[in-house]
Image: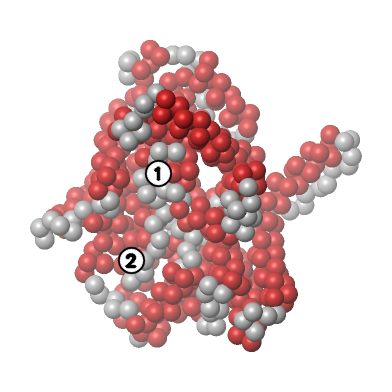
Amino acid sequence: MQFTSLIFLFFFAAVLLIYFVVPRFLRPLTLLVASIVFYSSYSVFFAVLMFVTILSTWICGNLIGRLRSRAPDGEQRKKKAILAVGIFFSLSILFVYKYFNFTLENVNLVLGKLHLGLIENRFNFVLPMGISFYTFQALGYLIDVYRGTTRAETDFVSFALFVSFFPQLVAGPIERSDRLLRQIRQCTDTALWNYERVAHGFLQMLWGYFLKMIIADRAASVVSYSFSRIYSVGTVGAVLGVVFFAVQIYCDFASYSTIAAGSAKVLGFELMDNFNTPYFALSIRDFWSRWHISLSTWFRDYLYIPLGGNRKGKLRKYLNIMIVFLVSGLWHGASWTFILWGGLHGAYQVVGDVTRPLKEKLYGKLRVRTEAASFKAARMLATFLMTCFAWIFFRASTLNDAIVYIGRIFTAYDFWNLTNGYIYKIGLERQEMNILLLAIAVLLIVDVLRYRKNIRFENIADRQNVWFRPLLMLALLLTILIFGSYGKNFDTQQFIYFEF
């Protein structure tokens, strides 16, 4: 049941109708049932597997909570043991379904090099949608209970809803217990009808559909064209392919987060912001404070800081950064391409930190005005280019494909294609490409408003006349219906992050 399907729209309308009329005390149960139906539409078995994670985490959390209530500063060994069991159990399920085959492939590769017998793989696991997202959300709660920053949830319905809340279940954002679980506990007292909140929510949803159906799915055609011709594409086509992939993955993932946040807001819940104009970042570190914020802050709080963060010297800090980003790459997918993508981002940050004193000294000697708009623009461009280079490994099917693709960029020069209309021959017809370029321009304007004025899209109409918001919503709806990438010439793309 994809967000972009008609069945989801009917489903969401039905959930809204029921949620708005049931007695207050039934609200959490209503949303839990809706979440089960939503996830079961992909696979009933996936839903059962998710509830195994939910049940085990809920039990471990309550056991830790009881020990903490009995002796807040004592029983540390028991609490640590229960925490370890809960983490191990959840990560074991994640490992089996996401990393078992990858691990076995690499073990057999080593065994083959050593001329030893190979291990036969009798299992063919299908990756459950969103398993990385809900596993990390459950683990974050369990660690928070252990740390004492949140109380153990004794009501199973509330906790199950926290992990399985359907708007953000499959592709995040990865919510924290002190935000979403607190809102679930209070939802029986929340006033359901609030015009501003509901209007903002529907406007967010429409903007998310614009990002997905107008931009991301069109850009996917260009990206597929370039990356499916790695042995014949020239420099211009390869560069355009990776630039359009940067646009595609941003609009694809941000669209899901935006639709999720909008639908949750209509229901009375506030989800955390997952993107904040990432391609306006001035450095890779700044990029990760703007991109997939829920995951980057999760790794910061539950991996980087426990590893020692920057408290144990420079070398340890750099090691911790590399560990975090290698794990982040592995979180995205069981492939060396993802691991290398994460490693590149870690290396970018380490090199940037090591060279910072030298750069500052150089800027001083050359009297570079670091606050000048031109300097910031140069930093933005450099950061975007480094990000795009790393995206090649994220998008390529194999390491060899990524290396070949990079080679085409730097050896297959065809600069004449910049002026001969080549852009209209790489996956999209002229009209469709012009629609895509115009939509990207709209996105750029919206992101500039947010970057410069801190005005989010759903707040654009707040200071306008009363007729402006419904007119904007109607314009968006008509644009999506008329120019949305569905129908005869388009294959609606699954959200990229469903794979993770």
Q: Amino acid at mark 2?
A: Lys
132 or 304: nearer the viewer = 304
Q: Is residue 370 left or right of residue 122?
A: left
Does any portion of residue 394 appear in the rendered image?
no
Separation of disc 1 and disc 2 at Cα?
A: 23 Å
User: How many residues crowd mark 1 within 10 Å: few (<14), some (14–19), many (20+)?
Assistant: many
Where is residue 386? Give x, y as percent.
48, 32
Q: How is the image coloured?
A: secondary structure
Where is residue 193? Give x, y as percent.
25, 75
| Circles 1, 2 touching at the beta carbon (< 8 Å) | no
Where is residue 374? Give x, y as percent.
31, 29
Q: Quadrant of the N terminus?
A: bottom left
Residue 265: numbered disc? 2
> Quick one: SS at disc 2?
helix
Quarter assignment of residue 90: bottom right
Q: Amino acid at mark 1?
A: Pro
Q: Is residue 439 above or below residue 265?
A: above
Q: Residue at x 42, y 25 (%)?
A: 365
Residue 127: numbered disc? none
* Residue on which the image places disc 1: 278
- Give whichever of discs 1 and 2 has the lower sequence position: 2
